[in-house]
Amino acid sequence: MRYTADRILTTHVGSLVRPEPLVALLRRLDAGERVAEAALQSCLEQSVREVVRQQLDVGLDLINDGEFGKRISWSRYVLERLSGFEQRAGGPADHAMPAAIVGRDRREFAEFYRDYDATQGFSRMRGWAVTGPIRYTGAALLERDIRDLQQAAGTLAAERLFMTAVAPGSVVPERTDGHYPNDEAYLFALADALREEYRAIIRAGFTLQVDDAYLATTYETLVPPHSMAQYRQWAELRVAALNRALEGLPLERTRYHVCWGSWNGPHSADVPVRDIIDLILQVRVGGYALEMANPRHEHEWRVWEKVRLPAGRMLLPGVISHSTNVVEHPELVAERIVRLARLVGRENIIASTDCGFAQGPFVRRVHPSIMWAKLQSLVQGAQLASAELWGRAGR
């Protein structure tokens, strides 16, 4: 992931707030209504063109399609692109959180989450079952997403474009399985299927970002009653499955995003990054995108005082938070960048966001006007950091 050597580049994690015309069409689809494919495609193309223009206007270096082609969520989108899954209960209107992601935070702050979850707009969260062999069937949808981004980017170099895809371990955290004999068989079947999506993104000339929120967030659903050793065994299997899916892909065109869940809640039971950083660094990618700006995790920049970033790898720290409507001051952004750059090397930093500003078409964490203000502050902060780190203003 080497792009330049004379300034701090900027990017974001991927999911951006969808425009209202696109949201309206997707709501109709989610409710089971018929929507003309031509109308949906026209709106999607226009939305991607606009979000690419806005990212370039704000000054971001490495950009994407905002994940606008993902119709369910950042992870469950793939259920429209895989065989072997069925939703047997719940249906499109079921917004309840699956038990597999209801951990200590939701138990200790049950009154808060009872009010909060009802406002979040998630759909198709429950009732998933594995009923047959998992195969990748989403080539047409993926080709559409790739084409829309390429057309919107025009003559922009492909190395400035990235596209996200879900990690095997984050596809469906709660499911019944009537086909595979155990977790390992299921995960490796997913890895083999998702490899097709990963490779297609690389073939298009983009950088692949793999999203894996459940690697970290599952800790609080397992520990206790299980031990840290048992959690790590669970996580190691998912890292192995992901590495299988990544096998053969160029390191310099891949990056890995781990977060503690994008919801703006207490996060009081999050696993410390020091306890899982070795697992994260086992993933064979060129860059690691981690939360380092929100109030629960900003202090964890100090982990890099003791942990060595592997040679040839990049750190994409979140220096802007998705979890608050407060717009970070550029000087604070620069401060976050500089202290990390002095630990891991200025040439090894790409400034990013903690997480996505929207987790699907109907879930947004901040108002879009604030999202763009935050991204502008990210760019301005990177410019200030570049001036300090290189002794002059970045280009």
Image: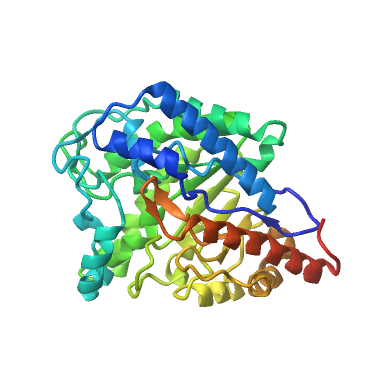
Q: How is the image coloured?
A: rainbow
Instruction: Name the residue at 36% across, 71% down.
Output: 267
Farthest residue in the right direction?
392
Q: Where is 240 relative to 181, above or below?
A: below
Most foreground residue, 78 or 55: 55
Q: Position of residue 244 (x, y in %)?
A: 44, 40
Q: On the image, which quarter does residue 24 sit in?
A: top left
- Whether residue 282 is visible, yes or no, is no
Horizontal arrangement in the rendering, residue 388 relative to residue 344 (left or right): right
Image spot of residue 62 (x, y percent) = 65, 47
Q: How many marks?
A: 0
Answer with left or right where residue 307 lies relative to residue 87: right
Please state if 23 lies on the left or on the right of 2 as rendered.
left
Residue 101 appears at what percent x and percent y? 26, 58
User: 93 or 12: which is nearer to us?
Assistant: 93
Q: Residue at x 46, y 60 (%)?
A: 366
